[in-house]
Image (spheres, rainbow, N blue to C red):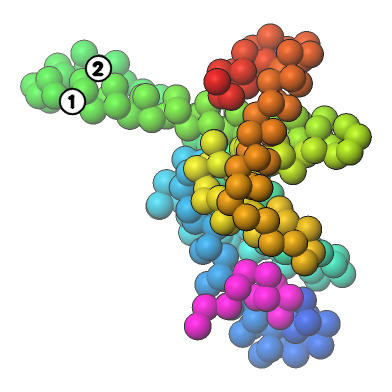
Amino acid sequence: MLESLDDAVRSLATALRTGDADRVDRAFRGVARSVRALDGMLAGLGVHGADLDDLHQELLGRLHDELHHGAELVSPRAWLRTVARHLACDQLRRRARQATPVAPERLAERSGVYALEDVFAREREEHEHEQRRAQLHLWVEGYVRAADALRPPRGHHVRAWHARRIEGRAIADIGKELAEPGETPGADCVSKWVQRGAELVRALAARDDDPVRAAALRRATA
């Protein structure tokens, strides 16, 4: 049975404290298997299947360094999700800088198959969509911090909105991740978090000094 991500990370932390190399190796392989639970989120951010292994390795390296230096992760899954998002956004930005698309008419001229123009247009549209999604995620991180500064904190509402509307995650998964210890929020409760998060994003956008960011986030909550 596949170990949960939280349990796998805690097993690795315990193994590192013992200094038993075999135990550390087994625990690390367990985390490597369990971390694939994040693949759905990464795919939603625009990470291609061929790039997932590289991102996994970088994520595992970050986790090993964190635990090796004695860090105590209260919520390993949440920590990994945050780091994975940042790595995915970095990867998308690198891909955007390296992209050198060929004009559609050149593709058609070289191949003699004009259908390739449609392929180029579709790839360009997907590329632009990935860039918008990555940029939106980075902006929302700032809005979460701004919402957390409110009284009482409401950052988790913005997180719920982002997870549901931008990442397309299931209500049940959002409830499990954002619930307080001992809390089991139902679907109606999480849906209200999502709705309240959208309201907060619109309110923060109305006061945002960056008109481009504000307009993008207003469109996302429409």
Q: Mark 2 points at which residue?
A: 104
* 201 relative to 61, above or below: above
Q: Please name the residue shown 75% across and 90% down the image.
A: 20
Q: Can residue 90 be seen in this view?
A: no
The quarter of the picture where the C terminus appears is top right
Q: Is residue 42 magenta?
A: no
Q: Please name the residue shown 40% across and 52% down the image.
A: 50
What amino acid type should be assigned to the residue bearing mark 2? Pro
Q: Which stretch is magenta?
A: 1-12
Q: Nearer the viewer, residue 185 or 4?
A: 185
Whether label 2 touches label 1, CB < 8 Å: yes
Q: Which of 171 and 98 is in front in this view?
A: 171
The total of numbered circles placed on residues is 2
What amino acid type should be assigned to the residue bearing mark 1? Leu
Packing grade of label 2 (10 A; few <14, some 14-19, many >=20) is some
**Could you tell me which secondary element the residue under label 2 belongs to?**
helix
Distance from label 2 to label 1 (Cα)? 7 Å
In percent of width and height, residue 145 lies at 81, 35
Q: Name the residue under label 1.
A: 116
Packing grade of label 1 (10 A; few <14, some 14-19, many >=20) is some
Q: Nearer the viewer, residue 18 or 107?
A: 18
In percent of width and height, residue 184 lies at 69, 61
